[in-house]
Image: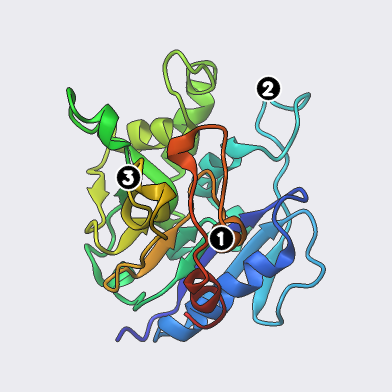
Amino acid sequence: MGSTRVNVLCLKWGTRYPVDFVNRLFRGVRRHLHRPFRFVCVTDDPSGLDPGVEAAAFPPPPPGMETGAWPNIFVKLLVFKDGFAGLSGPTLFLDIDQIVTGDLDCFFDHKPGEFCIIRNWIELRKRIFRRTPPVGNSSCFRFEAGKMDWVYGKFLAEKARAMDRRFFRTEQAFMTYAVASRETVNWWPKDWVRSFKRACVPPWPLNHLFAPRFVPSTRILCFHGNPDPDQAIAGYRGRHLNSWTRPAPWVAELWENG
């Protein structure tokens, strides 16, 4: 167990995710992180946050992005900017649509001082004839706040390409590329962070017959895209039959009690 205080960072804007998503995430971190920490939520609306959550305002948009909607997904590249939310030192970024289900200390003890991220999950059918692209999923990554301003600088220098889907389909693809230009991109062990869609939901057509199952060794359960935790509890019906999920009431228990 470390004694140095670490940071846990999340972002919340707009109305899709109510404040309860942040509070549940904070409570999960509090249960499973056994060292001093700051939990910082950068948000456009701090009302309703638990007392242990530090609220911070979003910074202004980067040069050249003043006329569009802000904040947007590219704000994830601003977290590397020196002084962002007053953070310094080891910082674990977590999307708020995740559930902490196990020990988090390993996320700070693993390869200290280096950049770590979960490798993005790809559908099985897309991996049959090609390798999984070396792209991280920005739902869960750790970086040294105050020492990686150059990632933000690279975004500013290559902003047009970064936002052009012909070159980078997502902000996380550019993040991986930017970090890899100067440092090693380290993947989290795959059993630490698992995708609800890829690890818990049976493959089509079995997803119509069997409910999702939790994998016990999971430490963070990630709900990237749809369904989100609230949708997974009730059962989800997307546009495509392979995205449907049967109700998973165990998600509610984990979300509440971890």
Residue visible at 27% across and 30% down in the picture: 125
Q: Earlier in the sequence, mark 2 or mark 1?
A: 2
The residue under label 2 is which amino acid type? Gly
Disc 2, SS: loop
Q: CA distance from mark 2 to mark 1?
A: 35 Å
Q: CA distance from mark 1 to mark 3?
A: 19 Å
Disc 3, SS: loop
The residue under label 1 is which amino acid type? Pro
Q: Which residue is mark 2?
A: 64
Of badges 2 and 1, the one in the foreground is 1
Crowd class of label 2 (few under 14; some 14 to 19; many from 20; radius 10 Å): few
Quarter of image, res 205: top left
Q: Which residue is mark 3?
A: 203
Q: CA distance from mark 3 to mark 2?
A: 43 Å
Q: Is residue 70 left or right of residue 127?
A: right
Q: Earlier in the sequence, mark 3 or mark 2?
A: 2
Q: Which residue is mark 1?
A: 229
Residue closest to the eye, 204 or 176: 204
Q: Is residue 40 left or right of residue 192?
A: right
Q: Is residue 193 above or below residue 258?
A: above
